[in-house]
Image: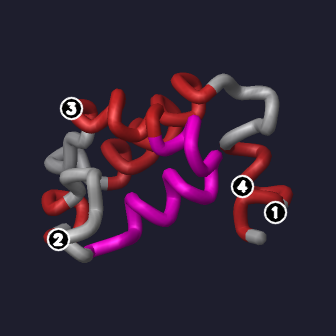
Amino acid sequence: MPWQRPDFLANYPASQTAQEFINAVLATIQNADPSVDLSSQQSALVSLYNQGGRAGVMYQLADDNVQTNPINNRSFHRR
């Protein structure tokens, strides 16, 4: 599982709260491309975290299905 790899855990320690994890992931995305701002999706991402953990969050961030994805990640996918 990618979220159990040492390099992933170095950036996103397992001890992080849901909010800390979401903030760190969104910061990584925005640092990679400042034009991508998913901060408006924080509460939806925290809900996903509470339902499906880290894997659920990462899956939905990567998912490009506009009809079924509850996260508005279009700017991320366009970049």
Q: Secondary structure at mark 1?
A: loop
Is disc 2 surrounded by few (<14), some (14 to 19) or many (20+) residues within 10 Å? few
Q: Secondary structure at mark 4?
A: helix
Q: Which residues are magenta?
A: 48-64
Which amino acid type corresponds to the residue marked 3 in the rendered image? Ser
Q: Residue at x 41, y 61 (%)?
A: 60
Choose between 38 and 54: the one closer to the eye. 54
Is 73 on the left-hand or right-hand side of 53? left
Choose between 17 and 75: the one closer to the eye. 17
Q: Is the Cβ of the residue at disc 1 closer than 8 Å to that at disc 4?
A: yes
Q: Is the Cβ of the residue at disc 3 closer than 8 Å to that at disc 4?
A: no
Q: Which residue carries the number 4 mark?
A: 8
Is disc 3 surrounded by few (<14), some (14 to 19) or many (20+) residues within 10 Å? few
Magenta stretch: helix, strand or loop mostly: helix
Q: Is the Cβ of the residue at disc 1 closer than 8 Å to that at disc 3?
A: no
Image quadrant in which you'd find residue 4: bottom right
Q: Which residue carries the number 3 mark?
A: 40
**Badge nearest the viewer, 3 or 2:** 2
Q: Residue at x 57, y 36 (%)?
A: 50
Q: Which residue carries the number 1 mark?
A: 5
Is disc 1 surrounded by few (<14), some (14 to 19) or many (20+) residues within 10 Å? few
Residue at mark 3 to residue at mark 2: CA–CA distance: 19 Å
Give the image location of residue 65, x and y in percent: 24, 75
Give the image location of residue 39, x and y in percent: 26, 32
Which callout, 2 or 4, points at the residue further toward the start of the chain? 4
Q: Which mark is residue 67?
A: 2
Position of the C terminus by quadrant:
bottom left
Q: Residue at x 62, y 58 (%)?
A: 55
Q: Which mark is residue 25?
A: none
Q: Is the Cβ of the residue at disc 1 closer than 8 Å to that at disc 2?
A: no
